[in-house]
Amino acid sequence: MTPNLPRPIAAYFAADAGDSQKFSECFTGDAVVKDEGHTYNGSTAIRQWKESASAKYAYTCEPLACEHQGGNTVVTSRLTGNFPGSPLNLRFFFAVEGDKIASLEVIPCEPSGDSRANDSEALISIVREMTESMTGAQSTRHWSEDALWFDIPPFASRGIQPALQFFDRVFGSFQSCQVDILEMDVVVNGDMGMVCTIQRVNVVLKNGDAKRLLVRETDCFENRNGAWKLIHQHASVPSGEDWDGQIVTA
C-alpha cells in the first residue's frame, strides 16, 4: 500500500514513470538534486539526469514509507529494474517549496539495512498483521504489558488481558472480516514510532448482518529491548456526515 505522500512528492513518483519533461516540472527552476555522487542544478540538468537514467535502465520505484525529519520529507522506496543489485532500497530526502520540490538527495540504504528504514518496515508489518487477525492473541502479540487501547465501541483498556478478552468476544460474533488499508503514514524517531492508517472494514456477522466502516487508526510504538511494542492504539469512525476517506493537505 502506497503511503500518503505530500502532493508535490506524489507528483514526483507519478512522473518518474513517465516522460522527463513532466518529471522536471515537479521541481523549482533552481532546484538541486544529489544522486550517486553527482549534483544537478536547475530544471534542465534535472531533466537530463532523468533522461540518462531512463535510457540506461528500465525500472519502477515503489514508495514504502514516509516520515518527516526537520524540514525534510523522507520517503523510503524500493527500486526494481534491469540494473545490477536490483531490487534496491533508497531513501529520498525532499525539501518542498509550495507545490514544487526545491531539493532532493537520494541515498541508498546500507546492505545491512538502514535502521530507520528497517524500523518503518517492521512497524508496517506489525500493523498489517493486526489487520489480518481474527483472535485476541494475534491482535495483541506485539502489545506492551501496559498498552492503552481506545476502541471504536465504548471500550477502553489498559494492559493485554482485558483487550485480548474483548477481541475474542468481538471476533466470536464475526463470520468474516476483511480490512483494507487505504492510507498509511509512518513516523519513526529514535525509539518511538507511529503508524496512522485509514482502513475500510467489511464485516459479516454470524447472524448474516453486514457492516462496512471507514476507520481511522493511530498505533503508537516504543522500541523496548530491541523489539517494537504497541503502547497505544486509538481507533475511531467519523461522527455525523459521511466521510470519503480523503486527507486534506491544502
Image (cartoon, rainbow, N blue to C red):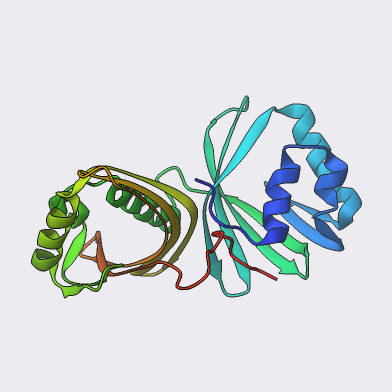
Q: Residue at x 81, y 58 (%)?
A: 27
Q: Residue at x 76, y 61 (%)?
A: 101
| Residue 37 appearing in the image | no
Q: Give the farthest residue toward the top.
A: 82
Q: Is residue 79 above or below residue 232?
A: above
Residue 126, percent across and down? 31, 52
Residue placed most toward the observer, 136 or 206 = 206
| Residue 200 appearing in the image | yes
Is 113 displayed left or right of 241 in the figure? left
Residue 76, percent across and down? 53, 52
User: Which quadrant of the rendered structure holds the C terminus?
Assistant: bottom right
Q: Is residue 155 above or below residue 109?
A: below
Residue placed most toward the observer, 96 or 33 = 96
- Report the number of discs: 0
Is 178 displayed left or right of 28 in the figure? left
Residue placed most toward the observer, 135 or 51 = 135
Residue 35, percent across and down? 69, 49
Is 216 displayed left or right of 63 in the figure? left
Q: Is residue 179 above or below residue 83?
A: below
Residue 3, percent across and down? 53, 53
